[in-house]
Image (tube, rainbow, N blue to C red):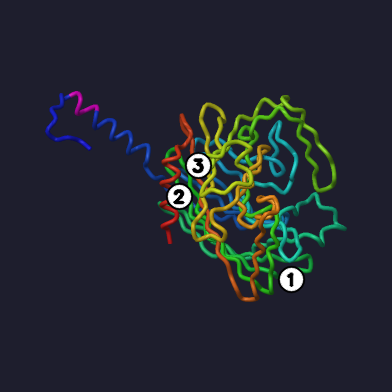
């Protein structure tokens, strides 16, 4: 607060107003443009005239995704593989594409791990999420996108209907995605307590946690890749949760938010996922892995508590459940602060 009784020099007053002006510019909201490209089954989201991300829902993918995702400075913060591999990209887990929302065990069907790599004879064990309608789009200070999709088995029988609403916003150094997803049961459905879910994001190579341990990855076809510990000099990321857990220790713990942060190019990049108090089993468990998987999973209690408790989610035909998440992508000289994330979490908790 400015003390009006204080005496300022003319140059001091000019400096003060210059600082206030620069601060206002730094926080200025940028316009969001939402553009549908129907023939490609794609919707582009541009903020400040620059591509932020694209909503992809082609028949060639087993789920809709936001891919790629850019920070406000233009840096891509999600892994390129498998859609647009970058040199040095890890090639494990081909189902990890951009940002997605699904689950490992719905009435015994695996929606999470389905990808082009699953052999045809095993596809019956996996589910698909098929987007059939773009319900709404709007551009402005906030961009809006809504879609309808069906969670189906290989016979195209619908287990769940999904309606998702996105809101996109941004400033000169920050991008925010608010996601609200409603799942309505078309038959009796059980989300069997499982590790892989629910809101997932695959990080760019730089945001992985450095490791000296050998890493072994097995893809859906059983192919094994081993990365020697210490050979990979690119990763420089770290996790931090709202409860103060860091690095690999964030995995399996609860928190109202978790962020990953590191450097891509000259800037510090932060990506945070914020849970909402109205979500089931709040605060969520963090399925945050050093190799680049960053996920919020409130429905994987058994594995995260080492078998001490479990929580299956049951929906009878016609019942529905709602999930709300906020994703914040921030860039600048330093990582976004705990205070700022707590403020964004409080704001999101109050949003209708």
Residues marked 2 and 3 touching at CB (< 8 Å): no
Residue at disc 1, secondary structure: loop
Q: Is 82 on the left or on the right of 30, as rendered?
A: right
Q: In this figure, which residue is indicated by the disc labeled 3?
A: 50
Q: Is residue 220 above or below residue 351?
A: above
Is 218 in the magenta? no
Q: Residue at x 72, y 36 (%)?
A: 90
Q: Earlier in the sequence, mark 1 or mark 3?
A: 3
Label disc, if present, on residue 244 of the rendered structure: none
Residue at disc 2, secondary structure: helix
Indicate which label's residue lies in the foreground, 2 or 3: 2
Q: Residue at x 61, y 44 (%)?
A: 68
Give the percent coordinates (x, y) of residue 40.
65, 54
Q: In this figure, which residue is indicated by the disc labeled 1?
A: 157
Considering depth in this image, is 352 or 75 the residue closer to the camera?
352
Give the percent coordinates (x, y) of residue 190.
69, 67
Q: Quadrant of the N terminus?
A: top left
Give the percent coordinates (x, y) of residue 319.
60, 73
Residue at disc 3, secondary structure: strand
Considering depth in this image, is 214 or 328 the residue closer to the camera?
214
Q: Residues within 10 Å of mark 2 (few under 14, many from 20)?
A: many
Q: Which residues are magenta?
A: 11-15
Q: CA distance from mark 2 to mark 1?
A: 38 Å
Q: Residue at x 37, y 42 (%)?
A: 28
Q: Residue at x 51, y 63 (%)?
A: 136
Q: In this figure, which residue is indicated by the disc labeled 2?
A: 345
Q: Residue pushed farthest front?
A: 308
Does any portion of residue 159 appear in the rendered image?
yes
Q: Earlier in the sequence, mark 2 or mark 1?
A: 1
Considering depth in this image, is 14 or 311 the residue closer to the camera?
311
Q: Is residue 112 above or below residue 232?
A: below
For residue 20, which quarter of the picture?
top left
């Amino acid at each position: 607060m400015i003390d009006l009784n204080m005496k300022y020099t003319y140059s001091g007053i000019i400096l003060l107003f210059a600082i206030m002006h620069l601060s206002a510019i730094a926080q200025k909201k940028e316009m969001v443009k939402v553009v549908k490209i129907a023939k490609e089954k794609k919707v582009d989201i541009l903020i400040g005239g620059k591509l932020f991300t694209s909503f992809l829902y082609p028949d060639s993918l087993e789920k809709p995704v936001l891919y790629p995702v850019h920070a406000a400075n233009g840096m891509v913060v999600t892994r390129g593989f498998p859609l647009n591999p970058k040199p040095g990209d890890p090639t494990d887990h081909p189902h990890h594409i951009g940002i997605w929302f699904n689950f490992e065990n719905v009435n015994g069907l695996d929606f999470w791990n389905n990808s082009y790599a699953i052999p045809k004879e095993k596809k019956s064990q996996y589910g698909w999420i098929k987007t059939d309608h773009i319900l709404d789009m709007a551009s402005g200070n906030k961009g809006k996108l809504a879609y309808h999709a069906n969670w189906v088995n290989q016979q195209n029988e619908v287990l769940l209907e999904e309606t998702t609403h996105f809101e996109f916003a941004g400033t000169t150094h920050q991008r925010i995605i608010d996601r609200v997803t409603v799942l309505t049961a078309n038959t009796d459905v059980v989300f069997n307590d499982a590790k892989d879910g629910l809101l997932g994001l695959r990080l760019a190579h730089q945001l992985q946690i450095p490791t000296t341990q050998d890493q072994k990855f097995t893809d859906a076809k059983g192919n094994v890749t081993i990365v020697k510990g210490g050979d990979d000099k690119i990763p420089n990321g770290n996790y931090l949760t709202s409860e103060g857990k860091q690095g690999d220790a964030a995995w399996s713990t609860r928190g109202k938010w978790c962020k990953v942060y590191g450097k891509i190019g000259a800037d510090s990049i932060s990506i945070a996922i914020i849970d909402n108090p109205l979500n089931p089993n709040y605060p969520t468990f963090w399925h945050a892995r050093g190799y680049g998987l960053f996920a919020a999973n409130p429905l994987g209690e058994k594995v995260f508590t080492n078998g001490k408790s479990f929580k299956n989610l049951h929906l009878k035909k016609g019942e529905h459940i709602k999930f709300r998440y906020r994703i914040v992508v921030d860039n600048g000289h330093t990582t976004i602060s705990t205070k700022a994330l707590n403020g964004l979490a409080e704001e999101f908790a109050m949003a209708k």
